[in-house]
Amino acid sequence: MKKHKKDDMPDGFIRNPMRQIEDELKAILPVVEQVRELHRKGRYGFDICPQNIVMSPKGAVLRVKNIQLNAGGTIAPCPELAAPEWYTGGDVGPWSDVYAVSAMVYHAITGRKLPPSFERSPGETLFDGLVQKYQSLADAISGGVELDISKRIPSLDMLFVQIQSCLIKITPAPAAAKHGAKTEKSQASFISDAAHERLRRKKRIVLWSVVLGVLLLGGAWLVNAVNYTQAVSHVESGAYEKAQRSLKGVFAFYGDAKQLSLYTEAGMRLKDGEYEAASRLFFELGNYRNASEMVSETAYRHAQYLMQKGSYSEAEALLDTIFDYKDAAQMRTEIAYLNACAYMDAGLYVSALEVFKTINSYNDTPVRIDEAKLKLYELALSAMKAGDTETAASRFEAIPGYEQSDVYAIGCSLLIRAQSGDAFTQEDYHAFLRLADITDLTPYLTCDTLITHYLCGSWQDEKENLFIMDSNGGIQYNLPGIDGGTYMFKDGILYMSPKDSAETPMFGFSCIDLNTVALYCYEDGMTYNMTRQ
């Protein structure tokens, strides 16, 4: 048998042209398809190795008697083909089967078994002296046997694509027919029957991807690309249902098909009014396409829907998250206006006025502001007349500068002081009297300083009995049986006493109105109804 020189083959590869095991790959392809189908059903973690592959009339079959869902910890896989998670207790999944298949391909193209995963180190060199022509294939296999799951090729589908892409690049074009026989003869003489048998045992899974590559190049891949292009076009036009249909003809591992599918699902959810689901999906896509903008668009449409329902607070909360997106600011203003109008209808004029002031130039807001102020003014006057001083004060204070609100607000504070018994000056008393035209002040004449200011002056009854007080403590009267030149008030009682004598309570009194008082004399039990002179 004619021997080939070592230089005839790529460095790092055993001497066997890939075409010689193509028939074996056709036989083993059913195993790979079998495992991929099981992956689609959620089953994975198989002991994929030559010893567990048997031939049947229909082709190669993986014995599955030891297969467990999610591994179950019952399989003892071949050490050279077992992913590290089998030994570390990590998550076993489709990526574990990717490791096993990649390890078998590594054995086939290098003639060396991959060291057990527990003996390997991250970043180790797997392919020594490999010529540049085959580097992409080496990179693909290295990705399949990564120790770190997060860096490993995650699925057989993706491994399929990467290997077949590499092989398309490195497989030479067919020679002319006249050279074909010579080439095949040369290749046949290159390897002994024993070596060929050894390759049948060790390399039966290496290049099933060649077969797949041929099929893809024969039309499947072209259809895949066309469907993907159509899906992208439909997404860009907002026809998400059509995009989803087109994506059914696209491999899940093709380009960004997985993200595109998620994007179309989010778009359909948005179109169907499932705003929360759509927002969540768009958010998961991060910076893919315009997903971040679509998060804002989803919030915008959701807010529009809530406004139509009258759920203004919820709509406003959503609009606050998208700031000046489209006309979000205008929508917030409209919500504020509608809320203020609702407050007006409910009689909550203070709240309505506060909101209207924030949107002073919107719609008929100036007119509504005047309406709210008038309502508050009328209600404040009514509350003051009813003796509800605190309510009146809060309403007057809410409309400063409107009509007599400032004056009445001060007056209300005086009424509150009078109710608490605080001392009054003469100036305070005069301000207090200015409220007499809108409310009865006599119920407030209870504290001593107010009583003093109230009684100062000249009083006379129908019998011309006189009672005169000044603001300096002096008193004059012609009431019978009473003697005294000075006075003082204590707890609403008028005490009178002659000079240098003990104070004696002399009069009790009640204010009938600001100009009429009833004096009760403790000395003779008489009551004198007197009017201001």
Image: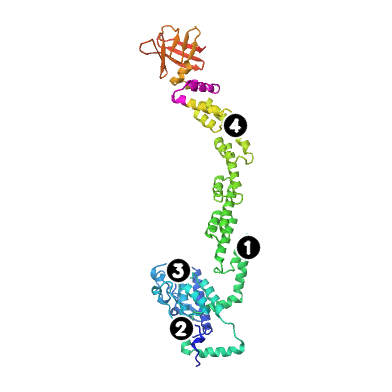
Q: CA distance from mark 2 to mark 1?
A: 49 Å
Can you tell which quarter of the image residue 65 is in?
bottom left
Helix, strand or loop at mark 1: helix
Q: Which residue is mark 1?
A: 234
Task: Determine which residue is flagged by label 4.
Answer: 374
Distance between mark 2 and mark 4 Cα atoms: 99 Å
Q: Residue at x 61, y 49 (%)?
A: 327
Residue at 55%, 75% (x, y): give it. Answer: 165
Marks 2/4 in contact by CB < 8 Å: the verdict is no
Work out whether 446 lies above or below 81. above
- Of badges 3 and 1, the one in the foreground is 3
Disc on the earlier residue, 4 or 3: 3
Q: Residue 413, image x and y in percent? A: 49, 27
- Span shown in magenta: 417-443
Which mark is first along the chain, 1 or 3?
3
The front one of 451 and 199 is: 451
Label 3 to label 1: alpha-carbon separation: 35 Å
The Cα–Cα distance between marks 1 and 4, rounded to whole angstroms, is 58 Å
Three-letter residue code for mark 1: His
Q: Secondary structure at mark 3?
A: helix
Classify residue 212 as left or right of residue 146. right
In the image, residue 419 lies in the stretch drawn in magenta: yes
Q: Are marks 4 and 3 in contact (CB under 8 Å)?
A: no
- How far is mark 2 from mark 3, CA to CA? 29 Å
Helix, strand or loop at label 4? It is: helix
Q: Which label belongs to residue 201?
A: 2
